[in-house]
Image: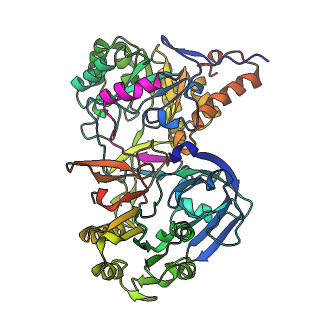
Amino acid sequence: MVTPDLAVDVGTVRLKNPVLTASGTFGYGLEFLPFLKLSELGGIVTKGLSPKPRRGNPPQRIVETPAGMLNAIGLQNVGVDAFLSEKLPALREHDTAVVANVFGETEAEYVEVCEKLDGAPGLAAIELNVSCPNTEAGGMIFGNDPAALARVTRACRRAARMPLWVKLSPNVTDIREVARAAEAEGADALSLVNTFVGMSVDVLKARPVLANVSGGLSGPAIRPLAVWMTWQVRRAVQVPIIGMGGIMTARDAMEFILAGATAVQVGTANFVAPRAAVDVAEGLAAWLTLHGIGSIRELTGTLR
Amino acid sequence: MPHRMVQDFATPVLRNVDLGRGNWLLEFPAEGVAAAMRPAQFFMIGVPGSDVLLRRPFSVCGLPGTFADRPDGAVQILYRVYGRGTALLASLRAGATVQVLGPLGRGFTPPSRPDARIVLVAGGIGSAPFPAFLAELERSGRRATMIYGARTAGDLPLLDWFRERCDGVSVTTDDGTLGARGVVTDPLAEMLQDADGGRVHVYACGPSPMLAAVAKATLAKGVACDLSLEAPMACGFGVCLGCVVPTRREGGAIAYERVCVEGPVMRAERLAW
């Protein structure tokens, strides 16, 4: 039997398979070594990196909701310098595409992190987090406003020559507007979607469950919303799309791929089962074999 | 490092015993991990095919040898039905399958001083990690005193088991239905009153307000105190960053540390409550 060809090209970034792990759900990758080989994945996307380490929000930070979860971690991370000196050298040992997710409170902070990361050996791409709903000075202000998103994308495009992906917020009236703005300013690919802003109330205490009041909703609950946005954006831009939102299985990943995503990211499922992303990749291979399809690329955007 | 030995495995339920008032004891085989597991380490447990998304954390209650006559390789968890996850667990019967990740976190370590007086403080279902710990202490010829509190008499699971194995169990209940009316820090304060602080080691597990009070009481007396913490968590192995507690770094700066990796057992003085 012919081994199915899972390789995809996200712009100039070649992935051995279309499955990456979503930022904030996979640490810095190394945490998963007891469970899987990173080389089994198309790529990994790091926790959002800021110029300085951030300690994040006070607890309670997470709560399960119907078919999903809310989180308000607040971008706790080691900072870009520690990532470059401690995490990236260790990641380089593994044959997978490493994508650094970048977060700033101001345009200047985004630029600072991008400049430090640009061209770092072993790094495949930068993903701009313009859509985190959980910080006060929030990246989301960039993600909500096409003009602000255009400015930060332009600035980061100038700061970094390496492939630049922009991760879009779904908390907008029309996601096609922000998608077009990012594409026009030179984004090489669009990742979508980040979490939906939500809130959960402890009715006995009459207080919000999360200390941050609101949090980002992820998990299967958001999958139909994310597939719909993938489909809308596919018809609005030319650049590749990396689709995500509640992917638990290969079947779920197929929804995004058929709707137009070149690659996918697995997020919340990594918490439920540490090998979830590998299982999705293996499931896609099995799907191709079962249907006698030679390459996953033949399926991208072929929704009838 | 225990992390090297973490396994994710499906295993059948051997027994799921109703202890009354929402308290249950679940037993399943865990041959591959039981030998390497420490008391107060924990499992993430899920039910395949259910519509509960995330697994739930449960500290190990019984390791092989903890409870007499239980099968080799079987482990037990003691839990209380509180929400959807635990209600689902309580619905399982022998033969059902659970998906288990573990062992996780850092467990209890016996006091290094061989003459230390060991005091266990449990609040309700917070007694869960103590059977395995007591069995381990017993094997090395050590004994412990216990303070066991709850809201009411029915909320003291395994009380008779503890009474057989401890040098005295001081019971407190909020409503006075068993033992002294009051809270665990009442008998604890008495015990620490005339104790030689350097010789006492307190281990506590229970609701956060109780742990904060135990921490305060022991710190005031310079008594060593290990707390087994609980927090909502999505993954259990250090990546979701959902389960953090505020801790004090050298110099007084506040950090957030993960209950699942840096804990669940933490020294009382580290916590910045």
Q: Position of residue A243 (x, y in %)?
A: 51, 27
Residue B67: in sight, yes or no?
yes
Residue A261: in sight, yes or no?
no
For residue A81, above or below residue B107: above
For residue A15, above or below residue B67: above
Task: Please state which of residues A289 and A179 is positioned toward the viewer in this rendering.
Answer: A289
Task: Please state which of residues A69 and A5 is positioned toward the viewer in this rendering.
Answer: A5
Query: Which of the 4 image quadrants contains residue B119?
Result: bottom left
Which residue lies at the image location 71% right of the left edge and 58% below the top edge? B96
Q: How many marks?
A: 0
Q: Position of residue A267 (x, y in %)?
A: 50, 36
> Horizontal placement of B242 versus B58: left or right?
left
> Horizontal placement of B241 versus B165: left or right?
left
Query: Is residue B180 within the magenta segment?
Result: no
Query: Is residue A75 within the magenta segment?
Result: yes
> Horizontal placement of A277 versus B95: left or right?
left
| Colouring scheme applied when the structure was drawn | rainbow
Looking at the image, the residue that sits furthest to the front is B114
> Horizontal placement of A21 versus B27: left or right?
left
Which residue lies at the image location 41% right of the left edge and 62% below the top edge? B112
For residue B60, above or below residue A276: below
Image quarter in which the C terminus of chain B is found: bottom left
Q: Position of residue B259 (x, y in %)?
A: 41, 53
Q: Position of residue A4 (x, y in %)?
A: 70, 18
Stretch of the chain drawn in magenta: A68-94
Looking at the image, the residue that sits furthest to the left is B251
Task: Please state which of residues B39 and A96 is positioned toward the viewer in this rendering.
Answer: B39
